[in-house]
Amino acid sequence: MIKRSLVVMLLLVATVFKSFADEGMWLPHLLGQQVYADMVKKGLKLTKEQLYSVNKSSLKDAIIIFGGGCTGEIVSAEGLIFTNHHCGYGAIAGASTVDHNYLRDGFYAKNKAEEIKTALTVQFLVRIEDVTKEVTDALGKLSGAERANKQMEVIAAINKRFSDADKSIDCRVSPMFKGNQYLAFVYEIYKDIRLVGTPPESVGKFGGDTDNWEWPRHTGDYSIFRVYANKDNKPATYDAANVPLKPKWFLPVSLKGVKENDFAMIWGYPGGTNRYESSYGIKLATDVNNPTLVKLRDMRLKYMFEEMKKIRLPN
């Protein structure tokens, strides 16, 4: 399982307005030539280096970890962020008062001076380091609890080595592909994030369902924030003198809409993936875990239905 807080950007490639989508989820720096070639055939106009580059600005610099683990994207040269309404929900609630209930009424700053301070942070990916050899050499032939404890120790040491709190740099090593690879994800953390706009909760959370992948969805599940930096464009705590971040890359917003066969892809920080599950893991899921869950849910539905039948609505 790839944990949300440790994962870097993954891709899911789709062709819009079609009844099919090419299945796939990839770490962008591990994107193979064949997969990239297939994406180009379907209409991708970016080079591989524009998708991900360590030494140059690229699409990775516009995609951020928003708050505790949501995905956000930078959409302007002045650090404007688009994210989900439910991702900004806590900040919107925190900014609300009895007299100014932004959850109920929504909010849009008319100028930068009206943007509201929050306690949020955002994280920009700086680089990815492959530390597999360092970890596996340290683990050697250890097994069981001894191996698990040693792994935690080694990972903690790498995290500490790559992190720099004075520069707002944080590193998190993640075991990938069932522990066959260890990658260190290095992030730069910005701490001055301000609320710019949000629809009312009746729009942003219409129906009470915040599941990103429900379809069809009828919610306006979005909110808008801005990231601020000091005069040197570096991370800083909230200060009235801070200025909007000048991002390395941002996603231009098109008003042209889409047409049939346009290329589309999803790029962000998913909760997790078991794409490279072993045959034993698949067998466990299909023969044990999933049937058990179905039986449990059948029991719940049965008892819920019995209770529903007891309810008598007034005429």
Image: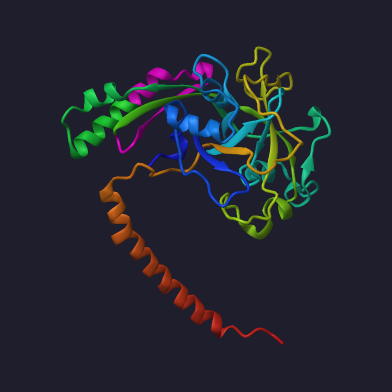
Left or right of 304 on screen, residue 228 = right
Point 46% across, 36% down: residue: 5
Point 67% across, 53% down: residue: 205
Question: Most extreme residue toward the front, as rendered?
Answer: 41
Point 49% across, 41% down: residue: 270
Residue 232 seen in this snapshot: yes
Q: How many marks?
A: 0
Question: Most extreme residue toward the right, as rendered?
Answer: 110
Q: Position of residue 126 (x, y in %)?
A: 51, 21
* Stretch in magenta: 156-179
- The colour scheme is rainbow
Q: Position of residue 221 (x, y in %)?
A: 67, 48
Left or right of 42 on screen, residue 91 = right
User: Within the image, what quadrant is residue 236 found in?
Assistant: top right
Query: Looking at the figure, which quarter contains the C terminus?
Result: bottom right
**Relative vertical location of residue 21 with respect to residue 192 in this rendering, above or below:** below
Residue 8 seen in this snapshot: no
Q: Position of residue 233 (x, y in %)?
A: 65, 16
Question: Most extreme residue toward the bottom, as rendered?
Answer: 315
Left or right of 242 on screen, residue 276 = left
Point 28% across, 21% down: residue: 134
**Relative vertical location of residue 100 with respect to residue 117 in this rendering, above or below:** below
Query: Looking at the figure, which quarter contains the N terminus?
Result: top left
